[in-house]
Amino acid sequence: MASATHPLASASTAGPHTTSASAVALPASSSGLSGLSGLTSGGTTPGGLTGGVAGGSAVVSSSGSSSGFGLEEIGIPGRDYLKEALTSCTDPLKAIEDFQIENGILLPSLRPMLPMLDLHGIKRLDFHNSVLEDLRERLIQQITGPTAQSGISAKERERKLKELLVKSFPVIKIKSLRPVVMSVLKQMSFIEDRYLKVLVRDKELYEDCDIVIKRHLWRDNQSLFGDEVSPHLSNYIRDKEALLYRHEAPNAFFALSPKARRQLEVIQRLADMIGNNVKLYDMTLQFLRTLFLRTRNVHYCTLRAELLMALHDLEVQDIVSVDPCHNFTWCLDACIRERNVDVKKSRELQGILDAIRRGQEQVLGDLSMTLCDPFAIHFLAASALKILNHQVEREGMPRDNTILHLLLRMLFLGLSAWEMIETQEFAEPKLDPKLVTKFIPALMSLIVDDQVRAQNNKLPLEDRATAQIVIEHSGPPPESYQNFIGSSLVATTLAMHYTLQTARAKDATGLKRVLGFLANVVHMHPYEDTFMHSLVTNLILMRDDFDAQDFCTCVFDEFFFTSINHDNFVRHLMRLLWFVYTKVNGTRLENIMKLTEPAAYGTPEATKDPMTQEYSALKERIDAHLKALASSRANEEGKADQVLENV
């Protein structure tokens, strides 16, 4: 099968490899070939399917035996023979009759029955096709039947398969016989290159190959495998981005559990394509590293972790046993599923990181990709915030919590994934001690302020603190907080999650304190889109606060408008407006719609652009609402005029 070179195939490999691959291992339940000795030793088969074969001497032709579809190669007269017989004979009808007798079903008791079939209007072609189909199915059953029932060893079985393939492969171009050849190929643990070349060059044959056979074809053809994998990778990324921007489900992205996510069709399809072939798995990881390096799209990191865990669920030991990230990913997956890092799992995770010795540093490339998965970042940062809240409540020191240190260590490793793979410098980044001694205390002071305000709001009006005390707990964040979020990815991530915490608590005052400081540091952050998705989800639940102009100024002017020239910010903003537009001031709403209008809006290309489609749907929604309001006001004014006239 001729295929264009896929861009992934020519890309330079980024990051460590797992291991070199061997051929796909033969399953223990492979089929037996009992009763096939006559077919594989040159005997004549009823119906002349493989009769007269010179044992083991057939030559595979790359042209696919264009003259006779391979029949002549296995000793059966084909088109050339029949053409010669008809052009050189004196009695064509006699030549046809002789050909039928010589090449028909060699069963004397059947011959008198053929005229009776003619009398019943049954064509000879239909009869012979029905016999062929029955024999073909019986032969396939013998080829694919259980080995245990045949009583032959795996080695003997493989030998018989090779003999049968030599004799049957020349007729692979004949569609009615092709299933037999394909069933033989499917059962073989190793297929010679001379057969694989024929399958690859012919598009029809390639498409008819079972995925088990295709794995043999892909094993040494990275370009072909890239062509097959690429659409699935694109679909995966498209589905992830659709979840981030969709309006129907406000919190769709983090809704699924890890187990449910890897049951999705794309993951299962990729796992099926890889099977237990280590080389194909290694190629897939190379593709993911290369695409992550080119695009900085962290969803490729998610796919890397989900694919490994999908193979883990399928118990593909040939792969999971050689992937050095398996135990780490498995343990992290369990933590994400349980939403908790206990002492036992923290020791296991730390033990794996500490066990990386000199010469094994390349493993950090794949480990960092696993930790750069947005679900992993979300979990690590949320767990760190959970510990900080707990430390505030018990008046503990953050530096004393060993699990917090591990979470920060893994978070920093994940956030450094792109730089590590891009520079090929596989060394674990060192966390700035001041992050724990300066930034985290400042962050905890904000948590204390939030708790003071929340507690004050629960008191009766007469018992609440004075305005001065409230102001002291509502002012700008500490200077160390502001400095760190602009210079440290870990600090920025923790600040983003603290912001989500205030929004989740519907604390408008707390949100206004910190949201504006994130405006210039969110863009190009690995957690950018997933943070924006979660922020918008929580802002939607605060829709009543959009009645206040100072809240709108903070959200729209100080945060969204600073990055309004980036398409992803525009799409997140439109998702927010979809739910809160009724609360936003009319003049402000009009200005926002002008700022978010895509360049392609109103052009023929608009129907193909997702962002333009979303803008059009939002504009129609808002226009319909404004039209309904105008109609309602007109009706009210009409009723008022009527009352005045009656007076």
Image (spheres, helix red, strand yellow):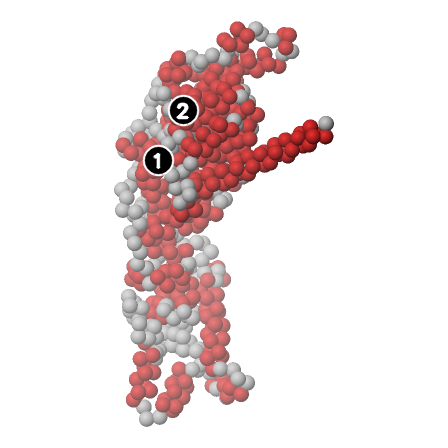
Residue 572's disc is none
Packing grade of label 1 (10 A; few <14, some 14-19, many >=20) is: some
Horizontal and vertical percent position of residue 530: 45, 32
Q: Is residue 442 above or below residue 225?
A: above
Horizontal and vertical percent position of residue 423: 27, 32
Residue under pointer 2: 519
Identify the residue at horizontal 52%, vertical 82% (top origin). Answer: 122
Horizontal and vertical percent position of residue 195: 32, 62
Check disc 1 and give the amino acid type: Arg
Residue ranking furthest to the bottom: 90
Residue under pointer 1: 296
Identify the residue at horizontal 36%, vertical 45% (top origin). Answer: 284
Packing grade of label 2 (10 A; few <14, some 14-19, many >=20) is: some
The residue lying toward the viewer, choosing from 532 and 372, is 532
Q: Which of pointers 1 and 2 lies earlier in the amino acid sequence?
A: 1
Horizontal and vertical percent position of residue 289: 34, 39
The quadrant the N terminus occupies is: bottom left
